[in-house]
Image (cartoon, rainbow, N blue to C red):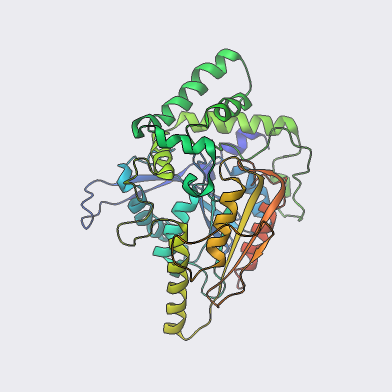
Amino acid sequence: MGALEFLCDIRFHRSFVLPPNKETGRSKPVRISYADYGDRHSDAVVLFCGALMGTRFCYSPLDGLARAYNVRIIHPDRPGIGGSDPVELHERIPLWLEMVPHLLNHLNISRIAIASHSGGVIYALNTILTYPNLLHPISPYVAFFAPWVHHSHSGVRNLRATELLPAPLIGRFASMVRFINNNITPLAGLSSGFMHGIMESIHASTPEPAPVPLTPANTLSRTVSLTSRNSHQFLDLDDPNVVEELRRLITEYLFAEAIDGISDDAKLFLKKPSSIEWCSPSMFWSDIDYVVPLLSKMIDEKNREDGTARSWTINTFHAQTDNMVGEKGQQWFDECWKNPTSTPGLANPGSRNPTEEPRGSSFEYKSEVVYGSEHNYLMDPAYDAAEKWLWRVRDAFPTFEVR
């Protein structure tokens, strides 16, 4: 199978319509585009929240690995991205939360695991807090890849410069990257990798995009370690020509559709203006260190109510090199989860070593640094993080059967 045939598969071009909602005052339907790939017959389902420019196409290289581990991945495009209709900035989180149960019901999915990459953690956390009942009733599983940490905690100097930029300038982020892709890249006659280099040079003012989680200069094997009944349908991700073609086509597809919502996500992630909240109106939280004790309390209360001792498993995969979050940001994120009963805002950087949370019964937290990886390419199948994650997803659904 070639890269073009692969990306033209209907699995990456699905959509559904969210009906009008009188309760929220939304009088018009909203179209949502999404990808549904991996093993579509599996009960082990992941709702995936991508990075800043991580549209439904961008993580398609995980398809073969997901099928090998019998995991199904559902990846919706956020408002104003891909084929999803736009909404106002303050409506992004509420609409996402309204969309999730409708989409899962549309697909006849009752239980999910949740995963995110980079800034997608904001959407993932809102989903977890609003719909904890959607996770597996016995073994709830959540995974964060290179989770976004606001620069007020990470201290990343390039991003701290955004404090001096007006919100309207950050709001033109999507227009800027579209101009680069449509004009400068073709004019230079260079490959799609050129855009990544350009964006690296301007990430001093905006978060660096991660359009394709396949590193262009890879020396590690991406061969799926499990034998799959559908292995003949896999892309050969060890063929550099296939990888380059896939990177080029994914970038082209990304810019062929709507990307204005990416600008709104950039403002959301950076909290520009400062009045922007990461939470939904129905449940307040200001930052990660506020979420963790809130989630811990919710889990404990639910366990007491049900007379159970259900413990969540939460994994974080950090990139070895991360110019967006930095080592300080990674430590801060881990420390938030290591101290779930601490007062919000008082978490301090902890150890760089892999972290395991033994306290209490509400959740078990583990983090690890993935050797050789970088923020944008952390989910490249060449590294072992994606394979570990999919194995744990499947393991979290003990009643899993291949139908």
Residue placed most toward the observer, 12 or 132: 132
* Quadrant in the picture for residue 127: bottom left
Q: Position of residue 9 (x, y in %)?
A: 56, 41
Q: Can residue 40 be seen in this view?
A: no
Quadrant where the N terminus sits is top right
- Residue displayed at 48% across by 68% down: 342
Q: Can residue 311 be seen in this view?
A: yes
Judge whether 109 appears above or below 118 on screen: below
Judge whether 187 appears above or below 78 on screen: above
Q: Position of residue 41 (x, y in %)?
A: 58, 59
Q: Where is residue 265 in the image (x, y as percent from the top left)?
A: 42, 41
Question: Left or right: where does residue 282 sit relative to residue 385?
Answer: left
Quadrant where the C terminus sits is bottom right
What is the residue that sits farthest to the top in this orientation?
Answer: 187
Residue placed most toward the observer, 401 or 138: 138
Judge whether 14 appears above or below 101 on screen: above
- Residue displayed at 56% across by 13% down: 187
Q: Where is residue 387 in the image (x, y as percent from the top left)?
A: 69, 54
* Quadrant in the picture for residue 391: bottom right
